[in-house]
Amino acid sequence: MDRDQITQTIALLVVLLGIARWMPLIDVMPPWFGAEDPLHAVRLDDLAASEDGRGADGSSDPVRAMLRAGNPRRTPHFTRWLTFAHEIKAATPDDAVVQLKGISRNEGWILAYDLYPRHVIGEAKDHGGTTSDATDASANVVIVGGPAPYWEHVR
Amino acid sequence: MIELAGVLVVCAVLGALVDRAWLGDPARDGFERLGRAWMLGFGVAACLGMALDLVGLGVTATTFGVAGAVFALAVGAAARGKSWARVVAPDEPAVRSTGERVAIVVLALIAFASLAVVIRSGWVRPTFQFDAVTRWMFKAKALAVHGSLLGDVSYDPLFAFTHQRYPPLVSHVAALPAIFSGNFDDRITSAIFPWFAVAATLVVYGAVARRVGVLSGVFAAAWIATLPLVGYLAFPPPGAGAFSAMADIPLALFVTGAVLAASDALDGRRDRAHLEAGLLLGFALLTKNEGLPLAVGMGLGVLVLARGARLRRVAGIVGLGAGVYLALWGLVSLGFPALDEHYPDRLNVDAVQEGLDRIPLVAAAIGHELIDVRGWNVTWIAVLILLAVGWRRGATRGLSLVPIVVCVQIAAYSLAYVVTSWTSPAAELNTAGGDPLSYLLTLTLGRLMLHVAFVSIACAVIVAPLRWPSPHDPPGV
């Protein structure tokens, strides 16, 4: 086998694997969790059609929560945070302060993104924070985690 | 959609003007010209935004529009009258066989179709990847809301999780549609990210086609466009899909452009290649901290490989890159809070000694990554075979820069893994109290290797180009 034949063989292998493993997927997200994969509960076509879902009205939330959660068990959890974020944004000014109680660090950071420019404070559950932490004097709203999460105005 | 299309057009115009006026526009054809225009335009647009932020004007539709127009007029005046010198590979056939033409069209269709699916996925899906949401998209949202990154989001420790000192090039580019429309929507904001992959594919196509012909160029393009780590998230945990709003593919684009330009400069293939290499190195430094090893690798490589004026060339390329970075972000970011895992503080003998027992784990992970078909198909194996087969006949002094840069980049990442103090609640869950390094490697190694994948593929295809069998070939060959 000379250099050209090796090159041609490698090229054929690279291209065939590229096609075989990639093109038939059509949707770029493989079904990680089998036939019942929640990531595929909302089809790309449906998502693309919901143009008015862009922005704050929440109609892209189901797929957003599924993708963020990454598994079916945690998806309702992320859906709840998205719902809270929409409600709090509608009920507070941009400079409001939101305190999290008993919520994990990573979920708190994602809430901070969703609620920005509102400032999000509070000790994360991973760092010893609990649902019964004292309310900070600067907080306008608190979000309380635990088995039955809720949010409320405190000021 | 109109705002995204508008930003893509603005970036392409800015980049094309810079290419024509300052860099000699070496593109082989319109495809490469468009790729280069986006590559340069994304960097220039972000630099304009950072400059506006630094001088206190902030990034708004008005300030960016005026600054962009003034810049375009100034550079456009310099570009006037300059012609495009079409560069064709020396052994490019004057007439192609039907088979070769069909192969070129098929490979091009594969590349286009792959990229089209990624673009569509980026367009319809919201941002979800954790690092993307908490770093790049967070800063893009801050820019869209306040027009500046020099406020609370960078100075208040409350936002330390956004990695305040991280360079923000991609956030500046991604924020532009929201800045022009006045409405932040993270689906539109993140939809610009796949276009970095499009630019990278076109840039590699052109760079390969200019040296060894169109057939090899489209083959390299199809290879990159169908890479699992570019096209889709191969397996949990997420990789670096081009639509995932991570900065790894943008960095890979600038690494590829900078190294290929420096390679042209070392081979004396064209004028202004040193300038291009320095500018793109600056963009890489402004994209991710992982651009820093690139400055070391390029400096070292040029020092070793240049035929003359070595120090002047190194100073020119690395000095320009570092100057762009320091002027627009590096110096001001020194005033922001540092991360707990601040790597410069960990680069000392004690930390290295402490982490020596991690070396086997890191080496094994890199070895596993090289043969991991889930993320790479057979990319790294194929690259190594092509380099082995073609290096002696096809390598040039300039192409020798590629292995030097790749080795420095991987060595730097390995050192970071050895000294890192990183941990997270997820790591503690997944490693049951063990060393969080194995979890960090699972999360990050694939996308770090992506930084050097495009330029490695380009180099491999250049040294062992694809040649269509000719009826004049002797039998048995």
Image (cartoon, rainbow, N blue to C red):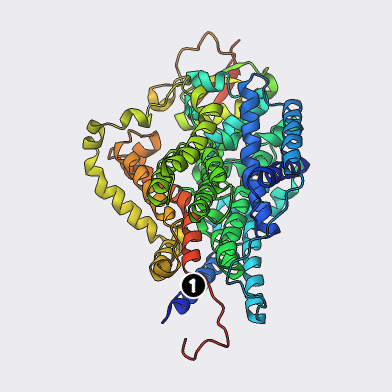
- The single residue placed furthest to the top in the displayed view is A137
Q: Secondary structure at mark 1?
A: helix
Q: Is residue A24 visible?
A: no
What's the residue at 47%, 69% (across, down)? B464
Please tell me in which quadrant of the rendered image residue B184 appears.
Answer: top right
Is disc 1 surrounded by few (<14), some (14 to 19) or many (20+) residues within 10 Å?
some
- The single residue placed furthest to the front in the displayed view is B308
Residue A39 position within the rendered picture, expressed as x and y whole percent measured from the top left: 58, 50
| Foreground pick, B372 / B404 | B404
A47 relative to B463, above or below: above
Please tell me in which quadrant of the rendered image residue A80 appears.
Answer: top right
State which quarter of the image contains the C terminus of chain A: top right
| Foreground pick, B277 / B248 | B277
Q: Which residue is mark 1?
A: A13
B157 relative to B185, above or below: above
Amino acid type at mark 1: Leu
Q: Is residue B449 visible?
A: yes
State which quarter of the image contains the N terminus of chain A: bottom left
The answer to whether residue B32 is left or right of residue A76 is right
The answer to whether residue B108 is left or right of residue B414 is right
Please tell me in which quadrant of the rendered image residue A124 appears.
Answer: top left
B144 relative to A76, above or below: above
Residue B86 position within the rendered picture, expressed as x and y whole percent measured from the top left: 67, 60
